[in-house]
Amino acid sequence: MNRTTLSLIAGATALAAVTGFAVLTAPDPTAADDGVATAAAHLPVERSSLLCPTPSGSDLAETTYTSFTPVTKGTESEGSARLQPAATGRPAEKGTEEGTDEDVEEGTEEGAEGGDGEKAAESAKPEKPVLEHKEGPGKPVTVDASGAEAPALVGTAEGRFAPGWTVQQTTEVAAGTGRGLQGVNCSAPDTEFWFPGASTASERTDYVHLTNPDDSAAVVDIEVYGKDGALETTVGEGITVAPHSSEPVLLSTLTDEEQTDVTVHVVVRSGRVGAAVQALDDSFGGDWLAASADPAGSLVLPGIPEDATAVRLVAFTPGNVDADLKVQLASPSGLITPAGNETVHVKGGMTTAVDLGDVTRGEAGSLVLTPTDGPVPVVAAVRVLRGKGDSQESAFVPAAREVGVRATSVDNTAKDSTLAVTAPEGAAKVKVTVSAGSGGGTPATGTYTIKAGTTQNIEVPVPDDVEGTYALTVEPESDDTPVYASRTLTATKDGVPAFTVQTLPDDRGMVAVPETEEDLSVLQK
């Protein structure tokens, strides 16, 4: 096996780890192979997968899906992106490679069992895509759905649409439990998720949505941790999610214990799933709680709305080691320490919650958590309230991954969107691009400096001719300084300040393809 082949395998492995589905363009066969290792190349992925949970169980729900891919150099000239309804698949009969048409439509007892969730499955008859994006990158495409019948979606983008493909699901619920604005970025499948900030309290109705994109069943465990440690669960182990389907699990059915703040840990034994928690409150509306960044010693929770009236921090550390965290707010003028909440002690294996009040005090802010001593891995999220009295609304900001190379927010409007960018460790420059609108218009770009330790709400340069919704793409220009960002979307209805916040992690559109450090072609001999 020569060096080029080894490099291709390594690159394809890296791509698969990043996107779940990824294909790599082969290196130029005419390139010189002189036995000298070269620097890793960054190439665009060629296939991406995203999963959108069931948006709402309310007949009053109105949902918008927005798909967008930024223009990326080096991609193929063809491709498309599509979102299709998740539908339970049927395994083929034992002893056959493919089931009959009758098996696909009606199913068989043997096939339905699936054998430990690993049997290959055939999908039900394909349905028409809910959204199909093929006009070209650089312009959003939207589609609307009404009522409680809108399904979970499984999406795939290929070719020029794959690098940085982003889909936002935004739902307005006019009344009832969970009323207000609920937003979530459709996510890539994975095998582990942490959700600090969920609840089993009587006034909350929290669902863990699990969506399986693959041809075989996924097997999932759901663990719940409260203020005193792990809660005893009855049916949280070995949950089977059928192929190409979505399973909402009501959190209160897993345990009899009612607790205001819990941490949910989703672990996939077999296969992959997308996961998100839908948190619905009787008094404070509802929103989606996206997964926290992976456990780490330091965390950043970017873009807490400046008019937040109450902020509640929920943190959890896996294992038996306690964590002591310094709490700071990255404000427009620098890092400040909230009076009375300078530190928080998180007991190992137990969920800790702290009320921070109106910590932003009318200014843009991001919460920065750092260890006071040795780092201990932690996950965290904040629940944010806006408004007063009976007109309060809730949303969540989880600990975020860095923007990295590039991140994108979609379903924006000039009047109702706020982009917050923070650089807690040092000054940074970022380039922000406004895309063409879903109804037309021209893109525009601006460059901004974020001072060290600050958060800035950026007034983006939206051209007057942009119609419909647009995408915001954030690209840091300071390689060595981590940057974090989020987008807040607002939609005040009948005096209620409805809102939702999505963090902007790296879109994973590019991947480094490593070269080996020595010529292993001698292995052919």
Image (tube, grey):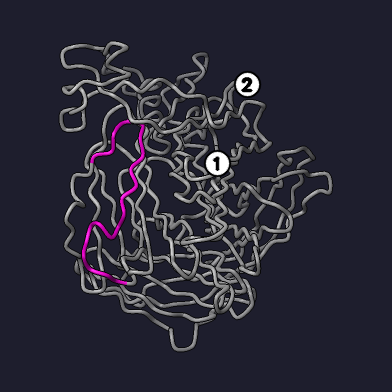
Q: Is residue 155 above or below residue 173?
A: above
Q: Position of residue 455 (x, y in %)?
A: 60, 68
- Range drawn in magenta: 240-259
Say which residue label 1 marks.
166
Q: Residue at x 29, y 51 (%)?
A: 266
Find out whether the residues at labels 1 and 2 contact each other: C-beta distance under 8 Å. no
**Does the magenta-highlighted stretch encompass residue 97?**
no
Q: Secondary structure at mark 2?
A: loop
Distance from label 1 to label 2 (Cα)?
Answer: 19 Å
Q: Report the front residue among 523 and 471.
A: 471
In the displayed structure image, the side of residue 35 where residue 441 appears, left or right: right
Q: Is residue 235 left or right of residue 176?
A: left
- Which of the marked residues, 1 or 2, is nearer the chain's N terminus? 2
Q: Where is the N terminus found, in terms of image quarters?
A: top left
**Rendered view: 188 above or below 237:** above
Q: Is residue 124 left or right of residue 75?
A: left
Quarter-of-image position of residue 516: top left
Whether residue 208 sits left or right of residue 463 in the image: it is: left
For label 2, count other residues whose C-alpha is less than 10 Å away and answer few (under 14), some (14-19) or many (20+): few
Is residue 247 found inside the magenta-colored segment of the image? Answer: yes
**Residue drawn at x 46%, y 80% as measured from the top left:** 356
Residue shown at the point (62%, 74%) measured from the top left: 307
Quickly name the residue at label 2. Answer: 77
Q: Secondary structure at mark 1?
A: strand
Residue kind at label 1, given as amino acid type: Thr
Q: Nearer the viewer, residue 486 or 134?
A: 134
